[in-house]
Amino acid sequence: LNAGISFEPYLRIKSHKDRKCLTQLRTSSHRLSKKDYKTSPTSSDAVKMCLRRCEFCTTANVNLLSELPFAEVPIIEDETHVLIFCPRYHHLRSALDTSLKSLILIDLERHQLFSSQYARKMGHYVKNILELRFPKTK
């Protein structure tokens, strides 16, 4: 949590879409599966976990991931999974510059990722992820 009230550097991103996506990530107001389970508080833990699973990683073509010793079963689609681990977004991570890739891996609290130095690139990365995850239908 931020100790004081201040204007966050990521709010200065010129691209409205990038800024909006980064704000959604920062406030957990996105549509990733992590949020879905919160809408059904009376459900059992097993049902909640099923609602949170990553649809991409639990499909037959990627299901081998669950066999890895460090993998959660089911693989949960939360912010960390999407930003760091999900193979669906590997091509987007590969396109990031080395310093941002490294920071994503080590900055678990996401404080530096929202700094003025990285905010624009991080906003663009998150926007691309969310557009791929939730394509607009015509």
Image: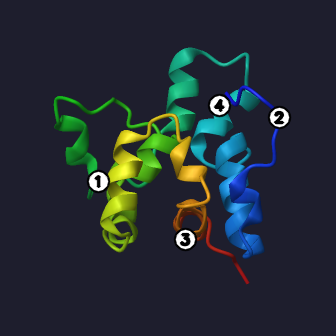
Give the image quarter of residue 126.
bottom right
Badge 1 or badge 3: first in the primary sequence: 1
Q: Is residue 57 visible?
A: no
What kind of colouring is applied to the model shown? Answer: rainbow
Judging by the rendered image, the residue that carries numbered circle 1 is 60
Measured along the vertical axis of the image, is residue 28 above or below residue 56?
above
Q: CA distance from mark 1 to mark 3?
A: 24 Å
Query: Could you tell me which quadrant the N terminus lies in?
Result: top right
Residue at 41% in and 55% down? 56
Badge 2 or badge 3: first in the primary sequence: 2
Q: Is residue 115 visible?
A: yes
Badge 3 or badge 4: first in the primary sequence: 4
Q: CA distance from mark 2 to mark 4?
A: 30 Å
Q: Amino acid at mark 3?
A: Asn
Measured along the vertical axis of the image, is residue 79 above or below residue 49?
below
Q: Amino acid at mark 2?
A: Ile
Residue at 34% in and 71% down? 91
Callout 2–callout 4 Cβ contact below 8 Å = no
Judging by the rendered image, the residue that carries numbered circle 3 is 128
Q: CA distance from mark 3 to mark 4?
A: 24 Å
Describe the element under mark 3 as helix, strand or loop. Answer: helix
Estimate the x, y position of residue 39 in percent, counting from the top left.
75, 31
Mark number for residue 37? Answer: 4
For the residue carrying disc 1, how many other residues have a C-alpha within 10 Å: few (<14), some (14-19), or many (20+)?
A: few
Judging by the rendered image, the residue that carries numbered circle 2 is 5
Q: Which circle, 2 or 4, is nearer the viewer?
A: 2
Give the image quarter of residue 136.
bottom right
Estimate the x, y position of residue 130 in percent, counting from the top left.
59, 63
Badge 2 or badge 1: first in the primary sequence: 2
Q: CA distance from mark 2 to mark 3?
A: 29 Å
